[in-house]
Image (spheres, rainbow, N blue to C red):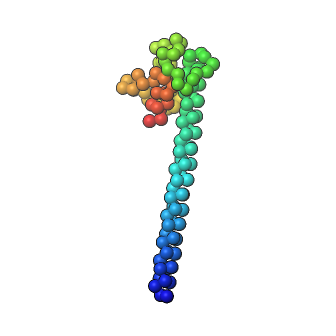
Amino acid sequence: MINENMDRVARYKRTRVRKKNVKARMTTIWYLIVSLNNKMKEDLNKLKKIKEIICEVLNIDEIDDSAKQEDYIEWDSLAYLSIISELEDQFNIDISSKNINNFDSVQNILTNITQ
């Protein structure tokens, strides 16, 4: 009888510990999801702004998310430098001679700005 009660108490304690662990994990997962969602929203806003800058400089109505410099005849070297200049102003970043050649597509621009 005493052993049975001790077993019950031990099982109860293990169950409580498991429930606390599950609750802690669920809370952690929830915070990760919220922060990931915020990061995705931030990246989408940056992508939208990048596309607006490129469209304005190239004087076009819209541009695809996968657009590259070689896809647009308007995206010549002068336009490239104008886009770089606008990106520096709008995102408050400094583009150096080391990475200036990495801004030849919408996705590359987004990648370099979010680093």
- At 55% from the left and 39% from the top, the residue drawn is 40
Q: Nearer the viewer, residue 100 or 71?
A: 71
Q: From the viewer's perspective, is residue 35 above or below residue 15?
A: above
Q: From the viewer's perspective, is residue 73 above or below residue 90?
A: above
Kindly give the residue lying farthest to the left in the view shown: 98
Answer with left or right where residue 106 lies relative to residue 97: right
Count the marks.
Answer: 0
Can residue 59 be seen here? The reply is: yes
Kindly give the residue lying farthest to the right in the view shown: 61
Answer with left or right where residue 102 lies relative to residue 44: left
Kindly give the residue lying farthest to the bottom in the view shown: 1
- At 57% from the left and 35% from the top, the residue drawn is 44
Expressed as whole percent of the image width and height from the top left, the position of residue 61 reads 63, 19
- At 54% from the left and 57% from the top, the residue drawn is 26
- At 49% from the left and 69% from the top, the residue drawn is 17
Q: Nearer the viewer, residue 72 or 59?
A: 72
Expressed as whole percent of the image width and height from the top left, the position of residue 87 reads 51, 26
Answer with left or right where residue 10 lies relative to residue 57: left
Q: From the viewer's perspective, is residue 33 above or below residue 20?
A: above
Q: Nearer the viewer, residue 27 or 45?
A: 27
Expressed as whole percent of the image width and height from the top left, the position of residue 13 reads 49, 74
Can residue 85 be seen here? The reply is: no
Q: Nearer the viewer, residue 12 or 29?
A: 12
Q: Quadrant of the C terminus?
A: top left
